[in-house]
Image (cartoon, grey):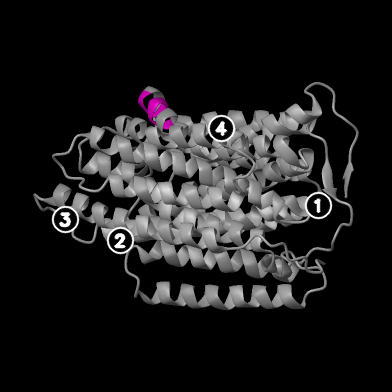
């Protein structure tokens, strides 16, 4: 059950509930990936040292993953429109901080807050869609559009950021993000209906603190681990994250009104949603996040050209997710997710053989196949996120799946970078060849992870177990 505020004038209710969450997701993913195209200029402009460079790259993932589950739970209990508007306003403020940042410290703080703001937009957006399109073909179409925005955002972010960078410098992207997110905040306040759970739960402070701090410690350990996995600070952060996340599980098991009901994991579709999102982050986002850098450093492409080539993958992903709802109903979400992960693996394998002498056309077949797989997986994961939880917990379901996705992505990027650069030594003439050799190994590992995820999705049964949800 949900409660609604009075209808808003202007844009129709269903149109607003589809267009605004889709636009917010598009903006969040564009902002997430935009830095890839202007990283060199950004680091130079901020005079970032070696340690700061790692945090510049990983800061938005930290804020995003740490806030997703909390944002989803708060939205269900205190109003999805309210948190959507707060998230958009916070994205505008943090974008201003990034645009005007005088040094790396301010920029990193701004990107962390951008991540938390993006978490609010992503979880509330899918929650609004889940509430507004309760069942059937319309829900499949709506969640497919939301999933399509993930691929389109990753495609457009680097391209537009690179173009703006050539026009007015890397800071121009953040001024543009400020304007777009401010417009979203105004539109959300004007046209979205309020929706929330019929029974508002109390704030699970113990769960909120342990989950947020635990994920933040985990992501910090992964980020620092790129400079050495056995460093004392990295080991301590991993230990702290393990303790905090164990405390979170304990708090959820014993709490009267937990932020995440652990009984949901007895539902096969919820388990599939979480595991599928984790594998997507590990096996898909990880390798694709680094591929543009490889094309720049090893193949000699400009950042803009590398972004356009990668756009073959993300653009195909957008189209595939957008059309996924037209597939016959006899194909279940479980089987389509398995197919998407299988195609992602085949795409990775098709890109093997990368070398400094190779033309970028060598990557096109693999990028196309992987794009179809990624789009299909994104559409199914969006559908599962709202179908696998009670109707009034749609934002929490979105938050749980997205948390798994971006924790997986952080691990995936760390794994890919470690493997791809393992044979690269500074000031050597054969750096490009060593980098492409390492990237081929990373493609193999990513393909193996995607195949494992596809096998798991294929064997998880969809038998519905109905626990007594609190």
Q: Earlier in the sequence, mark 2 or mark 1?
A: 1
Magenta-colored span: 161-166
Of pointers 2 and 4, the one earlier in the residue sequence: 4
Which residue was labeled with disc 2? 418
Q: Secondary structure at mark 2?
A: helix
Q: Nearer the viewer, residue 355 or 450?
A: 450
Residue at 45% across, 32% down: 315
Mark 1 or 4, closer to the camera: 4
- Main secondary structure of the magenta stretch: helix
Tell me the quarter of the picture where residue 131 sits. Answer: top right
**What residue is shown with label 4?**
323
Looking at the image, is 447 positioned above or below residue 163?
A: below
Which of pointers 3 and 2 indicates the residue nearer the eye? 2
| Residue at image coords 26%, 52% | 439
Q: Which residue is mark 1?
A: 392
Q: Earlier in the sequence, mark 3 or mark 2?
A: 2
Magenta span includes 253: no
Give the CA distance from mark 2 to mark 1: 41 Å
**Residue assigned mark 3:** 426
C-alpha separation, residue under disc 4 versus residue under disc 3: 46 Å
Viewer can see residue 32:
no
Q: Residues within 10 Å of mark 2 (few under 14, many from 20)?
A: some
Could you classify mark 1 by the number of other residues whose Cα lies within 10 Å: few (under 14), some (14-19), or many (20 or more)? Answer: many
Q: From the viewer's perspective, is the residue at label 2 or at label 1 nearer?
A: 1
């Amino acid at each position: 059950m949900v409660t609604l505020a009075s209808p808003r004038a202007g844009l129709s209710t269903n149109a607003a509930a589809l267009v605004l969450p889709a636009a917010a997701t598009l903006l969040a993913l564009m902002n997430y990936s935009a830095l890839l195209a202007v990283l060199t200029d950004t680091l130079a402009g901020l005079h970032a040292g070696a340690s700061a460079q790692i945090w510049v790259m990983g800061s938005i993932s930290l804020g995003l993953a740490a806030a997703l589950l909390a944002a989803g739970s708060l939205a269900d209990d205190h109003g999805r429109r309210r948190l959507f508007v707060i998230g958009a306003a916070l994205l505008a403020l943090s974008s201003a901080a990034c645009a005007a940042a005088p040094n790396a410290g301010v920029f990193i703080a701004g990107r962390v807050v951008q991540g938390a703001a993006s978490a609010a937009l992503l979880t509330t957006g899918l929650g609004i869609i889940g509430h507004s399109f309760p069942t059937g073909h319309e829900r499949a179409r709506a969640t497919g559009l939301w999933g399509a925005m993930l691929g389109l955002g990753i495609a457009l972010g680097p391209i537009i950021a690179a173009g703006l960078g050539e026009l007015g410098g890397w800071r121009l992207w953040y001024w543009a993000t400020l304007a777009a997110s401010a417009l979203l905040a105004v539109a959300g306040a004007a046209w979205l209906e309020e929706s929330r759970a019929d029974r508002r739960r109390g704030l699970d402070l113990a769960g909120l603190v342990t989950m947020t701090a635990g994920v933040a410690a985990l992501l910090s350990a992964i980020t620092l681990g790129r400079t050495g996995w056995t460093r004392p600070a990295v080991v301590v952060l991993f230990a702290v994250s393990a303790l905090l996340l164990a405390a979170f599980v304990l708090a959820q098991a014993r709490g009267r009104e937990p932020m995440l009901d652990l009984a949901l994991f007895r539902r096969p579709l919820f388990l599939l949603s979480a595991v599928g999102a984790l594998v997507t982050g590990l096996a898909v986002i990880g390798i694709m996040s680094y591929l543009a850098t490889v094309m720049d450093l090893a193949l000699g492409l400009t950042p803009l050209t590398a972004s356009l080539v990668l756009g073959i993958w993300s653009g195909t992903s957008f189209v595939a997710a957008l059309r996924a709802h037209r597939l016959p109903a006899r194909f279940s979400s479980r089987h389509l997710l398995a197919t998407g992960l299988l195609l992602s693996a085949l795409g990775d394998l098709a890109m093997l053989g990368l070398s400094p002498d190779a033309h970028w056309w060598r990557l096109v077949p693999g990028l196309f196949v992987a794009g179809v797989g990624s789009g299909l997986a994104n559409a199914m994961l969006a559908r599962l996120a709202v179908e696998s939880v009670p109707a009034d917990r749609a934002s929490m379901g979105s938050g749980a799946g997205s948390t798994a996705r971006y924790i997986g992505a952080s691990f995936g990027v760390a794994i890919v970078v470690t493997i791809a650069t393992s044979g690269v030594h500074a000031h050597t003439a054969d750096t490009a060849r060593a980098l492409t050799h390492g990237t081929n190994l990373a493609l193999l590992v990513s393909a193996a992870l995607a195949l494992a995820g596809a096998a798991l999705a294929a064997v998880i049964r969809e038998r519905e177990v109905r626990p007594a949800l609190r």
